[in-house]
Amino acid sequence: MKRSTIILVGSTKGGVGKSTTAINLALEGKNRGKRVLLMDTDEQATIDKFIRKRTTYLETNKISDIDDIESVIQRSNIPKFLRQNLDRYDWIIIDTSGKTSEEFVKAGLFADFVISPTTPCEADNDELASLQKILSQINTLRDANDVEALLCYTFMNKVDPKTLNTFFKSEKAKVKELLSNGDYPHINLMKQYLTYYNVYQKMHGGGYGVVETKDRAKGQFQVFVNEICEIESRINK
């Protein structure tokens, strides 16, 4: 059977939208006919809380959970769990905590690529050095096991639509220039970005994803996932 594509959603900073990204990526994958497992390795258990609210959402709207995404909390024995489930899913999406964690490193040994949200501000740009440091640590271990280097694809998240043509463009240009200086060999900047919409706040309390609404955020996120699928295709060649 085809091996799962393991997508690690990680950052060395909290509050940048990792769990929201992981949840919507999983739901959009399901909508595209993929067998998806959403793994929560973060001690804050944001995904686990969302899944409990989703159960209520499905019951209230009389929606069957038979074909819904599967989720699991896994903060120990990550390598063993992944080995046991590598052929059961199309996508295994792993949400990690917003720091340089043991879970990030262990999951990184198995991941096919990393998706890392950042926000358009100077402080979050500084976190790229920390992100490169943990990627270098992971890739030293991967190289020792004759596994090719793990690459990270960062994207601008929570973009304010009011500053799209002013502040955002200049901040994105700064990140692009920063990543081109050779100090960040494992980090790439994605073409797509995600705008801050109120629906992202509502989804956590409602137990649904933006890709299950008619909000304008849905189409934007689907285009974002198209780019992730392109990354997956390049890796699987």
Image: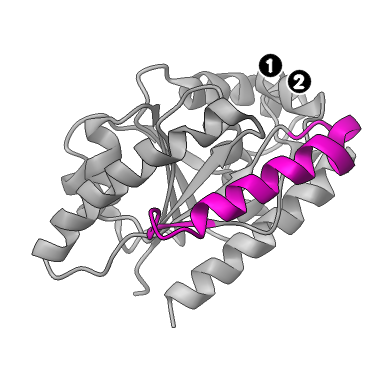
221 in relation to 143, above or below: above
Q: Amino acid at mark 2?
A: Lys
- Residue 140 lies, in percent from the top left, at 16, 56
Circles 1 and 2, Cβ within 8 Å, touching? The answer is yes
Where is residue 98, by image quadrant? Answer: top left
In the image, 14 versus 87, the foreground residue is: 14
User: Mark 1 highlights which residue?
Assistant: 205
- Quadrant occupied by the N terminus: bottom left
**Which residue, given by chain and number where applicable, does mark 2 sit on?**
202
Q: Residue at x 43, y 20 (%)?
A: 45
Is-magenta flag for residue 178? yes
Residue ID at (78%, 45%): 169
Residue 116 is situated, as x and y percent measured from the top left of the image, at 50, 43
Q: Residue at x 60, y 25 (%)?
A: 55
Residue 236 horizontal side relative to residue 123, left or right:
left
Please say whether residue 202 is visible from this viewpoint: yes
Q: Quadrant of the C terminus?
A: bottom left
Which quadrant would residue 167 be assigned to in this image? Answer: top right
Q: Which amino acid lies under the numbered mark 1 shown in the image of this protein? A: Gly
For mark 1, give the secondary structure.
Answer: helix
Which of 88/22 is in front? 22
Residue drawn at the location 81% of the way across and 29% of the way down = 197
Separation of disc 1 and disc 2 at Cα? 6 Å
Magenta stretch, main secondary structure class: helix
Give the magenta-colored segment's residue range.
159-188
